[in-house]
Amino acid sequence: MTETITHDELQELKQSVRGFLERHSTIADVRRLMGSEEGFDASVWDAFAEQLAFPSLTIPEEYGGAGFGPVAQGIAMEEIGRSLLVAPVLSSSVAATNVILSSDDEQAKAELLPPLAEGTARGTLAVVEQTWEQGSSAPTTVAVLDSDGTWKLTGAKHRVLDGGTATFFVVTAQTADGIGLFVVDRDASGVSTTDVPTVDLTRSCASVGFAAAPAVALGTTGSAPRAFSAAMDLTAIALAAEQVGAAQGALDLTVAYMKLRHQFGRPIGSFQALKHRCADLHGAIETARAVTSAALRATESGDRRRVSILAPLAKTRSWDVLDTVSAQCIQLQGGMGFTWEVDAHLYFKRARGNQYVFGDPTALRESAAGSLGLLRSAS
Amino acid sequence: MTAPSAGPGTHPASQEERFDVEIDSSAGPEEFRSQVRAWIGRHATDELTSMTDWSRLLTGNWWSYPDEMATEAYAAWDRAMQEERLVCAGWPTRYGGRELPVDYDVIVDEECLRANVPRVFRDQGEAWVGPAILAHGTDEQKDHYLPRIVAGLDSYCQGFSEPDHGSDLAALETKGVVQGDSLIVNGQKIWTTFAQYASKIFILCRTDPDRSLRHRGITFVIADIAEAGAALEFRPIRQLTGESDFCETFITDLEVPLANVIGGLGNGWAVAMTTLENERGGRSAAARNSAFEKEYQELLGLANASGRVADPDIRRQFLELYADLEALKWWSSSANTVHGSVEKIVSSEWGQRFGHLAMAVVGEEASVRPEGVGSEWEGGEYRLSKWQRAYFGSLASTIASGTTEIQKNVIAEQALAFPREPRGNQG
């Protein structure tokens, strides 16, 4: 059961998160942490958990969480995206938490959710093999039941978000009875990780190898696909909120620049062509925000079909907007926009990194199309 | 019948009033919606379903055409709606409304569209003039004009834009000169929608001859068309869609009582801004969104049936339009704010993108018009299919009520605080 959060409480949460990030995740902090070996600032992560209970927002009270839901998390995600916070938010507090929450496995929830809520454990999904789709629907990673009654996982997963620092993995693997989800501790035997050089230095990624690594099944094999799909819808919406925030951050930066930069005797922001372009970008962000808000609202309604339409649409739309806005923000800052020193490229690279996270946009759109009633051929 | 309900925010003076209505607007929204649905079920007749369509709403801003509104079936429905205080429902009870909140008014519109029956809507009198008079009029003016609008005795057209002053309305030149107890108005207006069917016109004129004052020195005045006689001449202008819904208006020595000035001499700009605010957002947005939803579902059905839905380009456009319609619906709830100019751009462009998609779905036949002659409100001899009308008609929406380009200036200046446009020397 989730608590209903009021509009005022949501605004308060938003302000608290924003205030926290303004203090603990300035652009200087982002630049310091990006591409670093540790991948995030542990003291900031701990404070995020202690002061704001962020990792616990969607975890029910019975598991030590704050007991709110996707809407509260979504509000926070927009602020997190705006600040480009370098932290395992998407991997752990969103994706891994969602998958565990959606499973029918009470024992797993009782074990895994409390440390996730506290921030002491950090999970991540290890799904991608050739692609996300293939890794989730036809993985080559296999799980076999050993003679001692434990599962052993063998395979290789790619582009695992925060794979180098997560404390456990949630892995898709083929079993004799179909595709299953498994939890593997990073310290288990047979687990190896290799950091991957990412375009988006604000997000770390690793390849993870499993060589007969001991694993615990998450939920029953048959229920895995449905639960996983529901979890990924929620994850898509949270990612959409993050992307709206990032787009807003990029535009804010650029609009501020355009008021200061003068050419031909006046601020460049006084030229109509540029005013109109920014009006377009503003409108696009507002639209993506509204679609994401509608998707978040849908998660409260219990209307699965509506969520299955709006989740992929919110994610793809907010990505398209981040893609466009971040590129324009380079353009509108001229020569300086093309430099490493100016922050525009950080948002641009966030877009590059996000494009295929948790699914191919074409596949996502097709999924929405199906739920929406677009037939594949003539009826 | 249920006990009478005054609804929220009742005007203190009207608490003595008793009126018989069936729907209790103090109920929660879901309960209200069921009551409205049931009321429509009890009172609407079958003939009404042929008198409304999303295409009327979207291409012509009509719920029903004048010839349909002249039928006995419609007249009976009009009376029923008036008795239920669902005409100008948001207005104070004193004038015939029931002070219905906007969100509830939207529910009534949605239920009418769902049942495919017309909402009795007093067009510009309800959307523009009424709110302006409620905000700026004297009590006498309210008592005079508003009940007549509710009763359908007056219908209004607008005299704002001029041939030389459209986007820059504050530079308008139509003159008003005070002479005793009258205002003598001279000038020319254009794009006066539905003037041919109106009984009254509301005009913006300059009563202070100093044009450099721009919006200061402009007066808002109402004139009766029958009383004006030859002083008002309307010449219909043909639109690219074939019909002639709007007119050039020639105003020659039009004498109007000063009592018809709303908001006082020189205050017309503020009065007009009330009306322009009402044109965007709120209830009209919600009704438009419902109509968008209907046309979307219909086009989707067509695309599925014909197989055009398999075209990846067409699929993509259906999805993007769906997402944008969700955004428009999100904004139409009063709790979710967005700058009005953003909504206007997204909404008007939605209609155009949709229409453009409709042409692709219809395919090669989109270049051929249907046989026969349409009504005067549907192109007459230049009859178009509803999909052609949906698209061609939508081209006006990015121009009317503030062009997209002007809206973008407004967004840049108000939402983003960029410097304002430099002005030229003239006007």
Image (tube, rainbow, N blue to C red):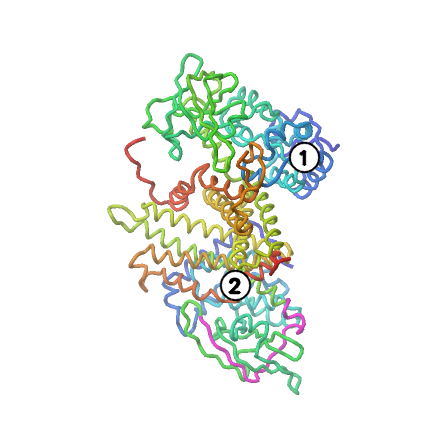
Relative depth, front residue between B387 and A94: B387
Kindly check if marks 2 and 1 are in contact, taking CB atoms under 8 A apart as contact. Answer: no
Asked whether, in this view, residue B416 is left or right of residue B317, the answer is left
Q: Which residue is mark 2?
A: A362
Residue furthest top as drawn:
B180
**Dot 1 falls on which chain?**
B
Relative depth, front residue between B339 and B15: B339
Q: Residue at x 58, y 50 (%)?
A: A6
Residue A71: give x, y in percent of width and height: 56, 56
Q: Quadrant of the N terminus of chain B?
A: top right
| Res. B304 mark | none
Residue A299 appears in the figure = no
Q: Residue at x 45, y 79 (%)?
A: A194
Asked whether, in this view, residue A337 is left or right of residue A248, the answer is left
Task: Identify which amino acid the numbered label 1 is placed on.
Answer: Leu
Same chain, labels 2 and 1? no
Q: Nearer the viewer, mark 2 or mark 1?
A: 1
Residue A28: give x, y in percent of width and height: 36, 63
Task: Identify which amino acid the numbered label 2 is placed on.
Answer: Thr
Does A281 appear above or below B386? Answer: below
Residue furthest front as drawn:
B371
**Magenta highlight: main SS:** strand
Residue B96 appears in the figure = yes
Q: Which residue is mark 1?
A: B48
Could you tell me how far apart the alpha carbons at marks 2 and 1 are, in whole angstroms? 44 Å
Classify residue B414 by image quadrant.
top left
User: Magenta region: which residues?
Assistant: A204-226
Q: Is residue A210 magenta?
A: yes
Badge 1 element: helix
